[in-house]
Image (cartoon, grey):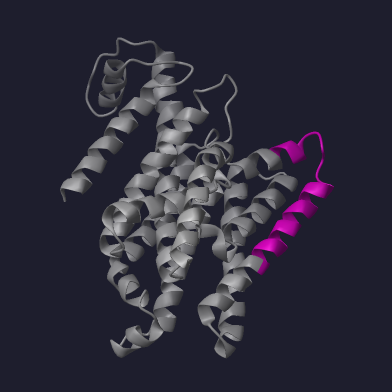
Amino acid sequence: MRFFGVILVLLLALVLLSFTVGRYPVPVETVLSILGAQFLPVTPDWPPETEAVVIGIRLPRILAALLVGGALSISGATYQGLFRNPMVSPGILGVSAGASVGAALAILLGYGMLGIQSFAFAFGLVAVTATWAIGATMGKRGDPILVMVLAGIIIGTLFTAFVSLVKFVADPYNTLPTITFWLMGSLASVELPDLAIAAIPVSLGLAVLLGMSWILNVLCFGDEEAKALGLETGRLRLVIILCATMVTAAAVAIAGIIGLVGLIVPHLARMLVGPDHRVLLPVSTIMGAGFLLAVDNLARSLFEVEVPLGIVTSIIGAPFFLYLLNRTRKAWT
């Protein structure tokens, strides 16, 4: 419990710091006054543009970073436990590639932000449904987990090809840059109504995954042990995959493709608190929220032009990924 308290305090401090940093710096006391004025009758002694920056721009972005980072991290921790492989990420079943197709198609058709998010969410679920159908059909003749992972790779490759096709037929001067920027991942255009919509599937998925964390512990020992304890492994695995996919699809729908968050953060959390998913899942969620918020602060503060989140997370995550590969290789030998 003490560890939970420490990381929560650090997360709250990071949230407060995030309101102050940027190309328009705001003092901490001003931030606290503006936030307090939303709930208490306070006479404003700050410029209107300052409140617009804090409430209209930075508040939705901070909340989005917390939501997306936590969603990707708990999804990654769930998949890693379910497939018993620390190299697994939330996109293993094709949800990211499917969401990319949906978003690219919506941009090509000229839809607004709501249409882009809806298409991304729907196509992400379609991709995972196809992966699950292939795994359920062909997995009867072999290892179901291995077959599902291979099916996810194939479905992901297929949907990536569809993204390339959409980009090929898109207008190279207007539509194509928009698609390309979305695929890099960003929180720049997120607004509070977008968060309200995305928070519904994320909250539902988080609640179910946290509630089933003890079941995930049992599934990690294999199907035979789980069935010996009276668990319906097939149905439970389907529910867990559905919830993790729903959480990932909602996160990708509002933020685009942000790589390596769901891979490195759960592994770091496992190194700190161990493999017990009753502890690992909430810790991964909190650490993922803080990690993406810190990365977003860097992305919008380092340069005059904002750097897409997917680029920053890849630059930061790649060295750790190499370390993970080296550690895994030593475990094999």
Secondary structure that dominates the magenta span: helix
Residue at (69%, 62%) from the top-left corner?
157
* Residue at the farthest left position: 2
Lateral position of residue 174 relative to residue 293, left or right: right
Query: Which of the 4 image quadrants contains residue 232?
Result: bottom left
Q: For the point 50% across and 54% down, which residue is it? A: 326
Image position of 218 (left or right of 250): left
Answer with left or right where residue 53 lies relative to residue 120: left
Q: Position of residue 312 (x, y in %)?
A: 54, 36
Location of residue 24 with respect to 111 vertically, above or below: above
- In the rendered image, residue 224, in percent from the top left (x then y), is placed at 37, 87
Is residue 184 one of those drawn in magenta? no
Q: Which residues make up the magenta segment?
A: 154-178
In the rendered image, residue 198, in percent from the top left (x then y), is placed at 46, 50
Q: Nearer the viewer, residue 111 or 4?
A: 4
* Residue 161 inside the magenta-drawn segment: yes
Q: Identify which residue is drawn at 19% across, 44% down.
A: 5
Give me the residue at 51% from left, 55% from top.
325
Residue 132 visible in the shown view: no
